[in-house]
Amino acid sequence: MWEKDAEIGDAAFRRSDLKGTTIEATYAGASSFMRRKYTRELEGVDIAVTGIPFDQSVTNRPGTRFGPEGVRRASRHNAWGPYWPWMFDPFDTLAVVDYGDCFFDWGRKEDVPSVIEDHIAEIVGQDVSTLVLGGDHFVTYPVLKAYAKKYGPLSLIQFDAHRDVEPEDGGRIDHGTMFNIAIQEGIIDPARSIQVGIRTTYHGERTYGMKIVYADQVHEASAQDIANEIQDVVAGHKAYLTFDIDCLDPAYAPGTGTPVPGGLTTHQALSILHKLTDVDFAGMDVVEVSPPYDHAETTSLAAAAIALDYLCLRAWQAGARGTALSD
């Protein structure tokens, strides 16, 4: 029992083993993601969680600079294990740490993209995958650049209300244009990429050959159907998963900068993620969480659940299997 644990309290700092779960009071202690150890030592680490508290490229409501802290805080509610419906603790299989945040000079916005890219490259260069907590969606662009240098052009699996491919010739720091730029720069392979939950359109947008699954199509299909479509498009190619929280309907994620009614439920999104077992993931991010617009942590809780399910998915791919409840 937790009462007998010699390291009870503040596992984020006091944990000696990178694996396993140390149970703590949900309302107390240091708020690392899922109570994982805060460290920048990556020997033996499988996945590093890191925050990018940037929101200077938003077109509407700011506040995603508070996203990483909000998601970490909300994750404490679930830091118990095993986790439903997987029925296992992913941290028994994966060594996951909280790497802390990417730090940049907010007064030199033009330098931020390269700072983020270098931050991720430092991790990926040690053969460690990342789970990024944003931050607005622009941060995905420099993250992808770091990954592409290692793996080449990536498949993009994007859950979003917006396609973020508005016309731009480069140089703009904007959370609505960066995938246009990424395609032009050969960072992502549009023919092997898919955008899920889309329910907006903007003048000048092009498909670039990307598969688009609109929100109404998701509502009319099963989770397995959507997962199959994603896996067919990716087809074994190295893929990066980016989840803009505004993919969810504002009823499930009100704390975001550009909410659009008609989106996915949290259950729909999680059900699709559960079934992406055949995807070869490079990394993932959850972005656009803006806690100031959510009075009850609903959005941060959803983001934490999505991030946790991704870790469970990666653990399943590494061999973790659950045990059914007994009488």
Image (cartoon, rainbow, N blue to C red):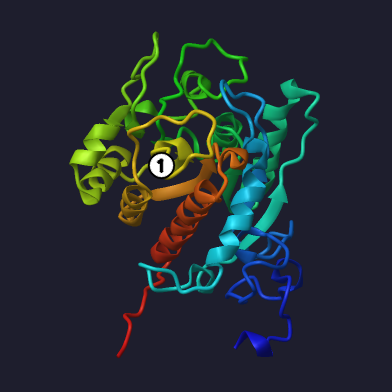
Residue 81 x %, y %: 49, 73
Rendering coords of residue 186 (x, y %): 48, 24
Q: Which residue is mark 1?
A: 251
Residue 264 shown left or right of residue 10 in the figure: left
Is any atom of residue 88 visible in this view? yes
Hey, what amino acid is under mark 1?
Answer: Ala
**Which residue shows up at 31% across the image and 22% down it?**
209
- For this rendering, which residue is in front, 292 or 87? 292
- Percent across and percent down for residue 206 are 36, 15
Q: What residue is drawn where x is 76% and y is 40%?
A: 103
User: Residue 94 or 270: which is nearer the viewer?
Assistant: 270
Mark 1 falls on what kind of element?
loop
| Placement of the C terminus among the 4 image quadrants | bottom left
Q: Residues within 10 Å of mark 1 (few under 14, many from 20)?
A: some
Can residue 46 be spotted in the picture?
Answer: no
Location of residue 112 (image quadrant):
top right
Tell me: 176 left or right of 32. left
Going by the picture, which residue comes out furthest to the front? 295
Q: Residue at image x 70%, y 71%?
A: 11
Image location (x, y in percent) of residue 123: 66, 49
Question: In the displayed structure, would residue 267 be above or below residue 158?
Answer: below
Q: Is residue 222 left or right of residue 52?
A: left
Foreground of the two, 298 or 307? 298
